Amino acid sequence: MAKLLLKNINKVYENKVHAVRDLNIEIHDKEFLVLVGPSGCGKTTTLRMIAGLEDISSGELYIGDRMVNNLEPKDRDIAMVFQNYALYPHMNVYENISFGLRMRKIPKKEVHEMVLNIAGILDIEDLLTRKPAQLSGGQRQRVALGRAIIREPQVFLMDEPLSNLDAKLRVQMRSEIIKLHNKINTTFIYVTHDQIEAMTMGSRIAIMKDGIIQQIDTPINIYNKPANTFVASFIGSPQMNLLDATVVEQDGELKLAFADAVRCINANQQLVLKKSNYVGKQIVFGIRVENVSLERKGYMLPFRGSVEVIERPGSETYTYISTQLGTIVSKMPIDTNIKIDDNIMVYFDDNKGFMFDKE
Ligand code: ADP
Ligand code: MG
């Protein structure tokens, strides 16, 4: 159990790659923080600096109240589970889980109790005498978790621990890891490139791009108030529709000029715009797929287009509509009556629209 503080942390590798820039995060005691971002954005580098496996180029790292920049990994009281969790192939599950404790010369009886306790938490009591080759991917992953948590670390770091599992197992293990966190009450920092894992697992999410944190907040706040177009398009699937527009003043009213026509915007948006004196400015208008309808329903901002693609993955219909502004995606109920090449109108619930600075 511990809080962590990352203060102005930078990492510049010897080849001059500036992998992490001015990172500032406070991670609360017992929190489940997810660090998410595309491949190469600096997630693993960040975790390795926290674990002490990589030098910090500048900045300060605190675990609890201790500045640990120069502390050896073994003295940081941290456990880490990687994507390629390597179990010892010649040892059975019991031996794999207890290996670290036996190295530390902890009495056999105590080790035995701890292994049984961990096996109970992870539901692997029946597998203790099996070798890794006799286990499924998910079972192996559980053993790897068991081996890490048996040391009762203050902080638990996980680097894409589910990315080698098949889709169904990945979904199952997500909730297993959440349950594990609830049971062992330790600070977790979980790295993933998968926005769904981030949204479903994190009590807070830190979104990273090119070594820079873009936003840190709860999943719901990030969904409802994305800080910029990167966050807006990274979170949510299919991704938020983003359309270029210019703010114009017409007949004393503020409106948005899109590529095909000028459209009124609702009062809420106008207030935002008036305050910041946006007239003449290019912006990006964002709207999530669930706020794009094929029925008018009193919505404003109609666009004309033709149906390009229809997806029905389950309880809903995603329609990809080709318009003069590019493809717009709409989410509708499963029974929506539509077919490819239909010429249709799409309507935005513009109350739910976002305005972003053009980057
Ligand atoms: P992620 O885990 O988000 O995919 P990484 O932290 O692995 O990203 O990498 C961040 C950046 O640092 C990338 O540009 C990567 O090529 C670079 N990098 C990672 N490790 C090293 C290293 N040991 N030496 C030099 N550059 C590295
Ligand atoms: Mg990585």
Image (cartoon, helix red, strand yellow):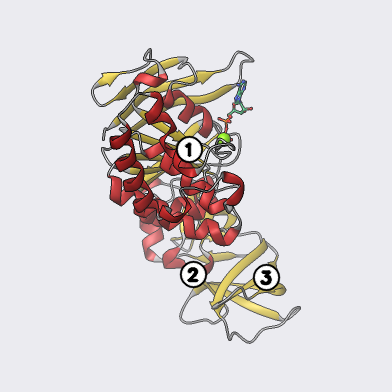
Which residue is depicted at the point 49% across and 73% down? 300
Q: Residues within 10 Å of mark 3 (few under 14, many from 20)?
A: many
Relative vertical location of residue 305 with respect to residue 42 in this rendering, above or below: below
x then y, percent, for residue 313: 61, 73
State which quadrant residue 156 falls in: top left
Q: Nearer the viewer, mark 3 or mark 1?
A: 1
Relative vertical location of residue 104 with respect to residue 30 in this rendering, above or below: above
Between 132 and 295, the one nearer to me in the picture: 132
Q: Amino acid at mark 1?
A: Asn
Q: Residues within 10 Å of mark 2 (few under 14, many from 20)?
A: many
Between 49 and 318, the one nearer to me in the picture: 49
Residue 291 marker: 2
> Label 1: which residue?
96
> Label 3: which residue?
321
x then y, percent, for residue 189: 40, 39
Q: Amino acid at mark 3?
A: Ile
| Residue 157 falls left or right of residue 244 | left
Tell me, yes or no, if residue 162 can be seen here: yes
Classify the position of ligand 2 by quadrant: top left, top right, bottom left or bottom right.
top right
Q: Amino acid at mark 2?
A: Asn
Q: Secondary structure at mark 2?
A: helix
How far, Cα to Cα, is label 1 from label 2?
51 Å
| Residue 160 falls left or right of residue 66 | right
> CB atoms at circles 1 and 2 under 8 Å apart?
no
